Image (cartoon, rainbow, N blue to C red):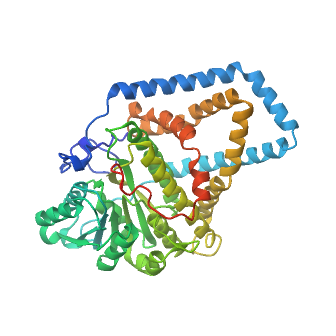
């Protein structure tokens, strides 16, 4: 059954179905009516968006036409490359990588079609749950987050709600206090004496929590009414489940073009890739926007997690990926719940976006190194093939980052027209799957942003992974203080 488009205006109010086993979205509490709310429901100007989409298709079709017209030049380029000293080895490596990536994609596609979210268990079976909301300079958004959690369809007597202000410099603490006044004993709020970072705020929540399951939710995220119960139900169904990833969509996708593009990208990342990873019991990262952890698994690695270092420096980024990695290492399954929806804010400008990607890239490098230390050992009783395959796939992307960058720069210098035309044709072919996937699940009209995002990423963010590798030892959240993002 086709899913409806998830957006802020109808996140709690629509009566359409999302999946056979997913409840309707209703009982809206989402309200945005002052400056600190970041105007999340203001729509982007359609002329600009239309112009970008038209330009996207003009570029892609131009690239395809040039590849057709310049076919003799491409043939000659291939002959020259094969006859060069490095040509044959390069061709063999490129072919091997192509077949590996194609095989991985087809395997992921097979796993995706087999995937089904676990249905919510009854109130009686639901475990006790501690929800931790760390916040830094989020203003009124933390109010919206806390109220959405309080209105969850989860038994009150089994829900502990904690909010921790990590030394904010704005009115975040005020809005936490307002939420406390409204919710009373249902909410406990705490204030760090100084900004120590998200990891330390979460650590305080873990130490204060009493639930069998810990749920972490970012302070600029809004959860659906049944998100919590759907997020924690796998722990009852699967006793080996150690962590669960929620399904993240973009909250501010009506404001600017980048959030529109990122929303399509997020759907591919979560609903396709994490569905496949979940079938292997090895989701590599539970997102900060909404994730759940078995408390026993958390406490087993908590000292290592809070004191984690990289190249002698304390780790102040990648706390979600690190926690996931340490729980996988214990032999637990890490799953994904497609029916556990959460809307979160993403960067609206290029500066915020590339800084966020750098932070993610550095975390990816660090945690792949950590994962290499256990993934080929006997860390789990059942099959370890899935985790190892995902690790190899991630590692290849890191290992090939510099060779790919060097080849790209040489290609541009020697044959710029051939490079740009072939790249645009590749984007048209590869991104068509994302368009079809999003169009089938949600909206074909919005799906075309996948093409724009691929062009944008290819030509303006290609440097992220090489830079993240070279600076993996650097500390810092990078995006602290930017109003657009957490």
Which residue is painted at 28% across and 63% down in the image?
168
In this orientation, which residue lies closer to the viewer: 195 or 37?
Answer: 195
Q: Residue at x 58, y 75 (%)?
A: 379
In the shown orientation, is residue 37 left or right of residue 289? left
Left or right: where 453 falls relative to 67: left
Quadrant position of residue 175: bottom left
Question: Outermost residue toward the top?
Answer: 69
Residue 126 in view (yes/no): no
For the N terminus, the quadrant is: top left
- Residue sitting at 36 percent across and 52 percent down? 482
235 lies above or below 254: below
Instruction: Judge left or right: residue 295 versus residue 410.
Output: left
Q: Residue at x 38, y 52 (%)?
A: 248
Q: Position of residue 416 (x, y in %)?
A: 69, 30
Q: Position of residue 93 (x, y in %)?
A: 77, 48
The picture places residue 68, in percent across and down from the top left corner, at 68, 21
Residue 49 versus residue 8: which sits nearer the camera?
49
Residue 373 image position (x, y, % from top left) = 63, 72
Quarter of the image for the C terminus: give it.
bottom left
Quick check: can you spot residue 143?
A: yes
Q: Nearer the viewer, residue 384 or 322?
A: 322
Total numbered circles: 0
């Amino acid at each position: 059954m086709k899913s409806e488009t998830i957006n802020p205006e109808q996140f709690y109010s629509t009566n359409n179905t999302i999946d056979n086993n997913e409840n309707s979205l209703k009982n809206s509490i989402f309200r945005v009516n002052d400056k600190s709310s970041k105007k999340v429901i203001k729509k982007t100007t359609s002329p600009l968006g239309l112009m970008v989409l038209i330009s996207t298709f003009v570029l892609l079709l131009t690239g395809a036409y040039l590849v057709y017209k310049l076919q003799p030049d491409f043939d000659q380029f291939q002959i020259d490359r094969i006859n060069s000293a490095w040509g044959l080895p390069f061709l063999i490596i490129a072919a091997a990588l192509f077949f590996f990536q194609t095989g991985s994609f087809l395997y992921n596609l097979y796993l995706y079609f087999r995937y089904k979210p676990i249905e919510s268990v009854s109130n009686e079976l639901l475990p006790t749950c501690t929800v931790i909301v760390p916040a830094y300079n989020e203003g009124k958004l933390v109010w919206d987050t806390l109220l959405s959690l309080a209105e969850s369809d989860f038994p009150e007597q089994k829900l502990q709600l904690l909010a921790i202000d990590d030394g904010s410099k704005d009115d975040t603490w005020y809005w936490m206090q307002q939420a406390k006044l409204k919710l009373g004993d249902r909410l406990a709020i705490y204030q760090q004496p100084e900004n120590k970072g998200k990891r330390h705020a979460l650590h305080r929540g873990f130490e204060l929590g009493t639930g069998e399951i810990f749920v972490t939710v970012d302070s600029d995220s809004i959860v659906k009414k049944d998100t919590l119960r759907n997020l924690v139900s796998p722990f009852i169904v699967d006793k080996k489940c150690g962590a669960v990833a929620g399904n993240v969509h973009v909250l501010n996708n009506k404001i600017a073009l980048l959030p529109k593009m990122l929303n399509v990208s997020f759907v591919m990342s979560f609903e396709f890739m994490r569905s496949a990873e979940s079938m292997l019991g090895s989701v590599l990262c539970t997102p900060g926007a909404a994730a759940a952890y078995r408390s026993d698994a958390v406490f087993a690695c908590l000292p290592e997690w809070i004191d984690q270092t990289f190249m002698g420096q304390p780790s102040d980024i990648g706390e979600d990926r690190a926690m996931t990695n340490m729980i996988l290492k214990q032999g637990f399954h890490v799953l994904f719940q497609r029916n556990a929806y959460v809307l979160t804010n993403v960067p609206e400008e290029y500066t915020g976006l590339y800084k966020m990607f750098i932070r993610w890239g550095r975390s990816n490098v660090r945690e792949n190194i950590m994962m290499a230390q256990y993934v080929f050992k006997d860390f789990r009783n059942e099959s370890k093939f899935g985790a190892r395959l995902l690790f190899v796939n991630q590692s290849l992307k890191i290992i090939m980052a510099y060779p790919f960058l060097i080849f790209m720069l040489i290609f541009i210098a020697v044959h710029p027209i051939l490079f740009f035309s072939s790249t645009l044709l590749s984007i048209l072919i590869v991104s068509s799957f994302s368009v079809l996937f999003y169009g089938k699940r949600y909206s074909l009209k919005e799906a075309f942003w996948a093409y724009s995002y691929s062009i944008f990423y290819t030509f303006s963010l290609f440097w992220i992974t090489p830079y993240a590798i070279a600076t993996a030892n650097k500390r810092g959240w990078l995006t602290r203080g930017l109003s657009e993002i957490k």
